[in-house]
Amino acid sequence: MIKATLLSAAACHGVLAWEAATASVSWAPGVTCPAGAFEFDPSSMYGESGYEWVGDVVASIHHIGNPQSCCQLAGGDGIHGIGRFYTLCNPKTGCHDSKRAYTCTIFSNVTGKRPLAGALSGHAQAPVRSIINGVQHAEGANNYANPFVSACRPGKTEAIPGDSNITIPGAGGGHGAREEGAVCAPWCGCPKAKEGQPACLGGFVECPTDDLPPGTTATPQCFLLGVAPRDFNCALVCDPSDPTGGPASRCPKGAACKPLYSKLDVASAGIFNTGACVYN
């Protein structure tokens, strides 16, 4: 058990890091690492290109070429850690520093960023555990619809299941306090994926970005983990500093942007909180 004095010290230290980071880094929807088999997709780009973070180096992991893998290494497990800032130097994306080739660097206490040609950088948070509820499917629903007032969308093919009525646990903004909500969550992942395979055969099924509920500007992301090994779903990522998600990440009408992590967790990690649009 962690003593309260240690928690307080970590929180104070984290708040200082948080304030320094926010002076030069703003919240962005790309903070949650892709779930599951997404890390095996060699064609996908994750993070922003052309810079690295300025801060304390927590770890340097070598022989990493895939940005999804780097993000997940930095993302923590959502329990013992919820994420740090990461930079991947991959020669295939144009980062030609021979001393750092295929190296995933993880930072804390970030105060800004500096140019690094071809590098991919982001601030990572772990995929989120979710719970699938009983679901009915019907034609005509929007993606990311309200499961309390309408049925969710059916699957397009036998290999790609329909939307699931999923409950997403949230932190509610207080350490230990949990606040939940539900959403019709489209399926994402590798339909033909097998354990241990080196790539996503047949292509990764991305989250739908069309036919969103009117007025929605929140970003669809594949970051929900279910109980089954290949159970991945999409939800709308939003800025939880605004209950609506704010103009750049506005949730659908009737949904609220609920934080996924507690204030103490994000302060101690020195990162931005992430929210998900959910209905109650």
Image (tube, rainbow, N blue to C red):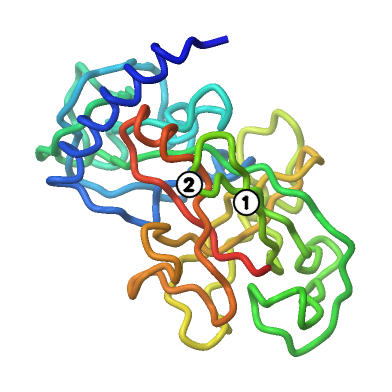
Dot 2, how many residues are within 10 Å of its Cα: few (below 14), some (14-19), or many (20+)?
many
Place of residue 108 in the rendered image (x, y in percent of width and height, measured from the top left): 28, 25
Give the residue type at disc 2.
Answer: Gly
Q: Are marks 1 and 2 in contact (CB under 8 Å)?
A: yes
In this figure, what is the number of numbered marks? 2
Q: Which mark is residue 179?
A: 1
Find numbered disc 1 in the image and state the secondary structure of the residue it sits on. strand
Amino acid, disc 1 = Glu
Residue at 39 percent across and 59 percent down: it is 239
Read off the residue under disc 2: 173
> Is 91 left, or right, of 175 in this rendering?
left
Q: Position of residue 240 (x, y in %)?
A: 42, 57
Relative placement, left or right, of 246 versus 53 is right
- Label 2 residue SS: loop
* Residue at 44% over, 62% down: 238
Spot occupied by residue 162 in the image (x, y as percentages of width and height): 79, 68
Mark 1 Cα shell of 10 Å, populated few (<14), some (14-19), many (≥20): some
Q: On screen, 242 above or below 42? A: below
For the N terminus, give its image quadrant.
Answer: top right
Q: Quadrant of the C terminus?
A: bottom right
Q: In which quarter of the image is residue 22?
A: top left
